[in-house]
Image: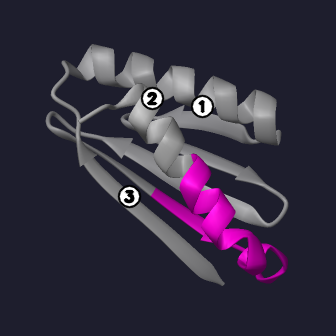
């Protein structure tokens, strides 16, 4: 297994941060067929070969992705896409 971790301050209210995370999740669902569900301030997502969670607090958003063995070779591409989604939804 291979992991990707991204943390970023969001500078938004909790409601705005959650709305941005929801927008990001809906784009990921459409583009990569990820299923996701919220449990409080943690969004868990999965599809075959990929699972993870995105968590929000008052100041920071954190993303943790676990890639299965078959997707290990795609880690750089997946990490670039995750960074792009963060840049669009949680700009610095």
Q: Which residue is mark 1?
A: 25
Quarter of the image with the N terminus is bottom right
Give the residue displayed 29% in from the left and 15% down from the top: 15
Nearest to N terminus: mark 1 or mark 3: 3
Is 2 situated left or right of 32 in this image? left
Is 29 situated left or right of 40 in this image? right
Mark pair 1, 2: CA separation: 12 Å
Is 64 situated left or right of 70 in this image? left
Give the residue displayed 78% in from the left and 83% down from the top: 69
Mark pair 1, 3: CA separation: 15 Å
Give the residue displayed 60% in from the left and 48% down from the top: 81
Within the image, what quadrant is residue 72 found in?
A: bottom right
- Numbered circle sitting on residue 6: 3
Verify CB contact (< 8 Å) between mark 1 and mark 3: no
Viewer-side label of 1, 3: 3
Q: Is residue 44 magenta?
A: no
Q: Secondary structure at mark 3?
A: strand
Q: Is residue 74 magenta?
A: yes
Q: Is residue 50 above or below residue 26?
A: below
- Numbered circle sitting on residue 88: 2
Nearest to N terminus: mark 1 or mark 2: 1
Within the image, what quadrant is residue 55 found in?
A: top left
Within the image, what quadrant is residue 61 found in?
A: top left
Q: Is residue 2 above or below residue 4?
A: below
Query: Which region shows up in magenta?
Result: 64-81
């Amino acid at each position: 297994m291979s992991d990707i971790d991204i943390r970023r301050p969001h500078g938004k209210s909790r409601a705005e941060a959650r709305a941005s995370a929801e927008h990001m999740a809906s784009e990921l669902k459409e583009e990569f067929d990820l299923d996701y569900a919220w449990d409080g301030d943690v969004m868990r997502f999965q599809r075959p070969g990929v699972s993870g969670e995105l968590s929000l607090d008052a100041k920071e958003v954190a993303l943790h992705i676990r890639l299965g063995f078959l997707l290990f070779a795609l880690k750089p591409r997946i990490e670039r896409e995750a960074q792009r989604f963060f840049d669009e939804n949680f700009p610095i």
